[in-house]
Amino acid sequence: MLREGRFVLLWCGTTASGLATWALPFVLGLAVLDRTLTAAGLGIVLATRTAGFLLAVPISGVLADRYPRRAVVFWAGLAAALATPFIALGLGRSVPLMAVAAAVVGAGQGACRPAFQALTAEVVDPGRRQQGNAAITLAVRVTTLVAPAGTALLAAVVDTWWLLVGTGTLWLAAALLPPRGLPAPAADVRRPRLLEEFGEGVREARRHPWFLAGLGALAAVIFTGYSATGVALPLVSRDRYGTEAVLAAALTAYTLGALAGALLVARWKPRAQGWTALAGLALYGFAPLGLLLPVHPVVVFTGYALAGLGIELFNVPWFTATQREVEPRLLARVSSLDFLVSYGLAPVGLAFLAPAIDAFGPRPVLAVCALVCFLAPAAAALVPGSRGFSRHERA
């Protein structure tokens, strides 16, 4: 795949957007360390970025089906690139200015995601989309593995202000690099409202029972397992093991597991792809399960490595099946529904899990999280079409 010029441009654009998305909270965390930003200010800026993302996702899904996907990527990336310097300007001066700019950056991020999904289906031929999706997710995982050390080294010689401006440069690359896709569909004489067009995407999603079941399982795993990573893992690392090294090592093991999963799924195409993907999603249950009991840290690391492996065994076939099964003119809208549900539940789960741990203690909450992670994909596997993520399976 990396020998084809059009795919390389798409791959570089998506990688740049993924790196920019990851880098902003990390660089702002460095700003907290050097006291140019307070912890409360960091929370406000990241919250407004998430709000911008969630507001833009459904709108951009409609626009990416109405206009050329390449144009939506361009304007979304350009908006994020132009807003990023204002985050840098507000650093140490104005948290409201940073928050407004972060909301625009989040909106650009949210607009890019469904457009990139649909553009991938236009650039890559159907027979090699699984390889293409695996190559894209592999680049993101490699970035998250090596970028923290590289950014920390840069921070020793470059001011945080310039690191923030650098994320804007990444967004500019994401806007300019991707190739052209297919022409825009013919303009409708009576253009329906945005809400009506998004509703058409929801109806298309309902035509695929496997999609609704898989999305429900993914949402349940994110709500519980992902939230356990964000809230319980730091607490367990500090209180049980007395060191932050367990936190860092567990997250590294997760990324290494995801890398292995992306490499595996790039070549492996099992007959029952849907069931295999859902089984991979269920592996996330080992992450909260490893935090449940006082075990050796290696057990925790193994659980997170299995979670990373499984999430890519799910993600790549999931994206590929969506690109294959959904009607092309509605693909961006269905993808936006996917991102809206999965990303939207992440902050809700994080907000819910901390009070639950305070009220009931970590062990009961982690046990429920592990149980949900195991049972939700199993329930989704019972839905018609889930065996191969296809509405056209034989009985």
Image (spheres, helix red, strand yellow):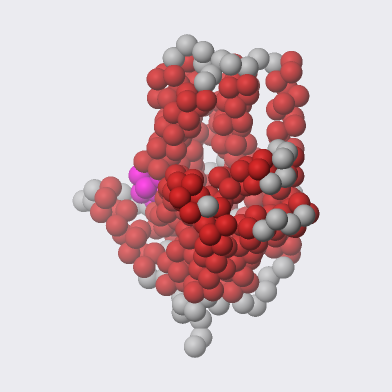
Name the main secondary structure of what is drawn in magenta: helix
Question: In the picture provided, is 56 more to the left or to the right than 374?
Answer: left
Task: Give residue 164's position: percent from left, percent from top.
Answer: 58, 22
User: In the image, is residue 310 above or below residue 40?
Assistant: below
Q: Nearer the viewer, residue 327 or 365?
A: 365
What are the residue bounds of the magenta stretch?
56-65
Tell me the residue at 72%/45% (across/down): 241
Task: Compare residues 203 and 371 and report the one nearer the observer.
Answer: 371
Q: Is residue 393 above or below residue 8?
A: below
- Residue 150, by quadrant, is top right
Residue 205 screen position, x and y as percent: 39, 64
- Residue 176, given in percent of the width and then of the height, sits at 56, 33
Which residue: 74% across, 62% down?
A: 264
Residue 150 shows in this picture? yes
Specify whether residue 115 is painted magenta.
no
* Percent coordinates x, y for residue 122 in the rendering: 53, 54
Residue lying farthest to the bottom in this orientation: 395
